[in-house]
Amino acid sequence: MPAANPNPRSQPIPAHMIPNSFLRHLFKAAILLALATPSRAEPVLSFVFDDPNGQAANVRDAQVASGTGGEARLRLEEADWSDPAAAEKVFQIVVDTTMGTKAFLRLINDKENPGSRGVVIAPAGAEVSLAAISRNAEGKVAFNGGIDMFFRYSEELPSQQELLPNLLSIGGGSLRLVVEADSGSMIATLVDDKQGTIIDTDGDGTADATRVSTSPVKPAPIDPEAPYHLAIAFETGDSGVVTAKVFLKPGTGPIDTKQDEDLVSQATFSVITEDSETSLHNGSFSIGTISRTGPAKAILDLAAFRIFVPAPAIFPDISGKE
């Protein structure tokens, strides 16, 4: 005969005796808790430029990033460099915890050392390229996705007081995405490389331009001493109207796209075309140290680059696992 439970109140309640109303409230609470706990967004392409295999010293054909979705190599044309030692003056691997938990790539554009420089990102396929953000359907191009990067930019002997780096110019015969400092802020521009009038900028349903740029929301001057988290998010509504937002956050922390704290420029527009091949670039692209003001020496520290489809509610910080 089993011993009696010394504390009858501690016995479990049979399932059939639990009220349905209690179960419903418990289920609803679990859903609300899950919605309130944001999961980390996973990019389709992600690189940290930490030179994981120590190949930067052998600059020719060097893979200089760890990550997923393709590969990243130094942009170096052999004909440009008769002296391999000269490459060390424009490619460096640097450790500085203010830029994240890993080492990063420093690109130096020095007029005293002419030649190609930069990094080439080669997506493994169109589904992990910039083209994955865009989709052509029913006479319009929808954009749903985002990109972000972690960088620091400075100049020696600046050509002017305001730093104006051109951080991205990604295109290849269709739609080109340009991201650069301009008008005291950070601006994204979408351009039809074919110079077709396919962009509706005033919302009247008729294409009226070959390009569209985000308009400044607030100033965002570049501090040469500070690292930045840059993010560009695209979202298309049911009517085909695209909202593009540019965020710039000092430091390497996350960017919440539902808040305006880090929003620096934005635009709404539509891309109207029957050409099914109109999209963002689906192949390789390069990132380099470019400025419209042509300084004697420009320095770009590049820690990470990612593509998300769709754009996350929160662009994550650098976890060290990209």
Image (tube, rainbow, N blue to C red):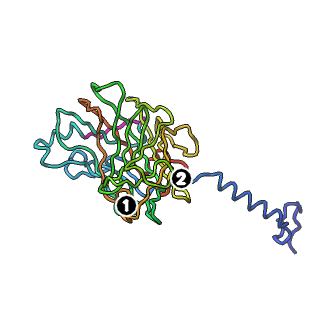
The label shown at residue 4 is none
- N-term-proximal mark, 1 vs 2: 2
- Say few, some or many: other residues with alpha carbon within 10 Å of mark 2 (under 14 / 14 to 19 / 20 or more): few
Three-letter code for the amino acid on which mark 1 is drawn: Thr
Q: Residue at x 47, y 43 (%)?
A: 246
Q: Tell which residue pokes out farthest to the left in this image.
A: 82
Cα distance between the residues tagged 1 and 2: 31 Å
At which x and y percent is residue 223?
40, 29
Q: Is residue 11 visible?
A: yes
Q: How many marks?
A: 2
Q: Residue at x 32, y 42 (%)?
A: 105
- Please give left or right for residue 93 compared with residue 242 in the image: left
Residue 93 drawn in magenta: yes
At which x and y percent is residue 260?
56, 39
| Residue located beneath label 1 in the image | 278
Tell me the element at label 1: loop
- Name the image quarter holding residue 187: top left
- In-front residue for pair 21/1: 21
Q: Tell which residue pokes out farthest to the bottom in this image.
A: 1
At which x and y percent is residue 121?
31, 53
- In-front residue for pair 33/285: 285
Q: Give the foreground label among 1 and 2.
A: 1
Tell me the element at label 2: loop
Q: Residue at x 26, y 30 (%)?
A: 295
Q: Are marks 1 and 2 in contact (CB under 8 Å)?
A: no
At which x and y percent is residue 98?
42, 35
| Residue located beneath label 2 in the image | 40
Three-letter code for the amino acid on which mark 2 is drawn: Arg
Q: Which stretch is magenta?
A: 91-98
Q: Is residue 68 visible?
A: no
Q: Residue at x 47, y 66 (%)?
A: 138
